[in-house]
Image: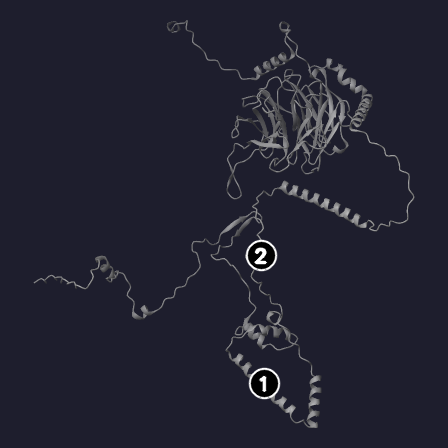
Amino acid sequence: MPPKPATKKKKVASPNRVEVDDDLEEWKKSKQLLKPKDQIELQDFELKELVGRTLVMTNNQIPNNIVEFSYVEKSFIPVPQVTNYIVAYECRGTIIHRDTEEAKAIIAGTDGEDGGMLNVYKSLIFTPIGSEEFEDKDKEKDEEAPAEQEDVGESEGVEAPVEEKADEEKKEEEEEIKPVSAKKLTNQFNFCERAALTYTQPPRMQETQTTPPPVKTFSGNVLQWIIYDSYQIDYAEQLEEKERERERKEKDKAPVSKYLGPPRKSKKKLPVKKGFSEEQEMRIFECWKVLERMINLNTYDEIAKDYRYWEDPSDEFREEEGTLLPLWKYSYDKTKKHTVTHICWNPWYYDLFIVCFGYLEFLKPLTEGFICLFTIKNPSYPETICLTESAVMCSDIHPKYPYMMVCGMFDGNIQVYNIQASAKQPAYMTKSHETKHSGIIWAIKWVPDLPDGELNFYSVSNDGKVNNYVLMQTELSLTTIINLYLDRDAAAGPDGTLVKLKACATYIVLHPSNPIVYMVGTEEGLIYKCSINYNAQYLMTYQAHTMPVYKIHYNKYNSSVFISCSGDWRIKIWEDNRADPLFVFDLGASVMDVEWAPYSSTVFGAVTAEGKVYVYDLNVNKYKPICTQAVVSKKRNKLTTIAFNYNMPIVIVGDDKGMVTCVKLSPNLRVPCKPPKKQQHLDQWTLQCMKLDRLLALVREPSVLAVHTDISVSDKSTI
C-alpha cells in the first residue's frame, strides 16, 4: 500500500499574536546548505586546524626585467622595477639590543686605549627594564649606600688610633702611584645630559602669521640663443656693478675734512673753445667729402674716364666673344677675414651699392659683421659703415625708399636700418626668440606695401619657415606664411614617434608681375612655387638640383622664365609650369651666384668657386659662354656673388676675402638688338621680348595637331 500523503496541520492563530508578513517569515527560516558532489571530506583535526592568511604587497601584473636602449652607452640598460609603496620617512637608529652579537662583542671588550669609546658604545646598548642585569645593578647600589653611612658614623664618633692613620696614609700614597684609568667620555648621542634640547614655540594667533609669498606659474623653452642672451645680460650687469664699485671706492678715497692743505696759487683760466653746431658740422663734413672725392678722381682719373667712354677695340677682331675690363677694387681693413655674402645695387642711385660681410666657413666663426655702403665716386673708403653683433648673410633695399635697408643675420635676428637717420643703431630689430628665426637667414626681400601703407618684407631660413615681418610703429610684427615640408614619408624618431621632415630654405624670390606668388629654393635641391593664399600646399615642385639651390632670378623681359644655380655645378633655365628645364649648363665647379643681365633678355652671368666669371648669350651660343675670365686667384680666393648695374655696363663681384671687384663688359657682351627694316619704329624693350620668344619657340616641344577629315571628299571616292 502506498503511504498516505502527509496532511498539513492548520495553525490556529492566537488572538494576542500579531500577524507577520510571509516574506519576513521566509527570511527568518534557516537556509539549507547545498553540498556539491565533488566536495572533499576532511577529518576533525583538519577542520580544527587554523590556516593563516598573509597579505603580500606584490602586484603580479607588473612586468619584470624591463630594459631600454641607451644611446650613450649603446646597449640595453635594465629599468628599475616599479614598487607598490613609497617611503615617506626613513631614519637609521643608534640603539643596539643587548642580545645581538654586536652588543655582546662590545660588552665582552676590556677598557684600554679605546676605553672611552667602549663606554660610549655601552651607553647605547638597550637593556630592557625587568631583566636580571638591571635588578643586580639596583641591589649593588642599595648595599653600597649603608656601608658608606657606617663609615661616616665611625669617623664622627671616636678618633682612630695613630697606627691606623699611618696605614691609611701608606694606602693613599700607593693609590696615587697607581695609573689613573681613562676618564669616561660623555655620550655624544645622548642629548638629555646637555642643555642642547630645543624648546617648543608658543602658539601664535592667526593675526600674527605672515601671508604666504605670491606664486606664479612660468614656462619657457631652454634653447641655445636664450642661454646666450641671458649670459650677455648677466655680463652687462656685472660690468655695471664693477663700475659702481669703482665709483664708490673713488668717493671713499676723497678727503672728508674741510682742510685740503695749503692754499694753491690760482692759475689763469684758459679760454674754452666753443663747439660747432650740428649744421656747421654737417657743412664741414660735406666739404671734407667733396675734397676726398676730388682726390680720388685725380688718383683714378684714367679709370674714371675708361668706364664711361673707352671701348675695347679688340672686340672687332673677335667673333662672338668678349672680355672684362677690371676697374676698381673695394675693401675695408676690418673685413679682410670676412666673406662677401651679398651685394645689392641701390634702385635710385646707380653708383651706390651695399656689401654684406659675413662668413661661410662655419668651423671658423666670427664674432661681428659689417654692412658697408660703397660708391663709385670713392673706391678708397665706404660711405657708411654699420657694425652688427653677428655676421650679415643677406640684405635688401626698399624700391620706393632707398634709405630703408633690411638685413638678415647669422644668428637668426633681423635688423632694419634707416640710413638717412642713423647708421649706428637700427630702427627696428628682433628683440626676442619668439620673433627671430631659429637658424641662419639666407635671403630677405621687400614686398609691396600693405593697403594701409605699412612696409613689410619676407625672410627665409634653414628652419623651414617663410616669415612676413611688418614694420609697426615701435616693433616688428611677425606672421609665418608657410612651413616648408619635404614630400617624403615621415621618419621615425628615437622614441618611435613619426616626425615630418622639414625643408631648409636657402633663397626666396617674388614673382615680378604677381606678388602673391613666390618661389623658395631649398638645401635638398628643390624649388617650391608657393602662394600667399595657401599655407599648407605648394602650387608646384621643381626637381631642380641635387645640391643646395643658391640663387633664383626672374627674367626682366619675360616673367615666366627664371634661372637657378646650385652647388652641383649646374645652371638651369626654367619656364613656369614646366617640370623640365629649357637649358642646362655645366660649369665644372660649384656655381655660387647667377643673374640675368638687365640690358638683354638672353644674357646672364655667373660666378664659380674657382674664381671665374662666366657670361652667356643664348642668342649667340646656346652651348658655350661668350666670356670666361678669372677675376681672383683660383688657389687663394673664390667668388661668392655677382650683380649687374642697371644703368651702366659694369658688373661687381665679391669673394671670400672681403674684396669687391668692379669690371666693365666689352661691346661684344652687350650687343643691342637691331630692328628689322620693316619695323624700325619698335623700341628696345619690344625687340628684346621678341628675341626671347623666338628662342623659346625653338626649345619648346611642338604642339600636336589633330588631323581633320576632308568633308568635301565623299566616302565612295576614297574607296
Measuring from the top left, give residue 394's x and y in whole percent.
66, 30
Q: Is residue 337 left or right of residue 121?
A: right
Q: Name the residue located 48 percent from the left edge and 13 percent from the top edge.
A: 705
- In the image, which disc is placed on residue 440? none
Residue 281 vertical placement versus 89 (above, below): above
Residue at figure coordinates x 58%, y 28% from the top left:
520
- Give the Cα separation between the discs numbered 1 and 2: 56 Å
What is the three-letter code of the residue carrying label 2?
Thr
SS of the residue under disc 1: helix
Residue 279, compared with residue 85, is above or below; it is: above
Residue 685 in the figure: left or right of residue 334: left
**Residue type pointed to by label 1:** Ala
In this view, the residue farthest toward the left is: 1
Q: Is residue 62 left or right of residue 323?
A: left
Contact (Cβ within 8 Å) of mark 1 with mark 2: no
Instruction: Tell me the residue at 20%/60% (across/down).
Output: 19
SS at circle 2:
helix
In the rendered image, is residue 632 in sight? no
Q: Quadrant of residue 502?
A: top right
For the rendered model, the colour scheme is: one colour
Q: Quadrant of the C terminus?
A: top left
State the residue position of label 2: 208
Q: Is residue 145 above or below residue 350?
A: below
**What is the number of the mark on residue 145?**
1
Horizontal and vertical percent position of residue 390: 68, 36
Give the image location of residue 342, x and y in percent. Answer: 68, 28
- Of 622 and 442, which appears nearest the observer? 442
Q: How many marks?
A: 2
| The N terminus: image quadrant | bottom left
Residue 309 spot, x, y in % from top left: 76, 15
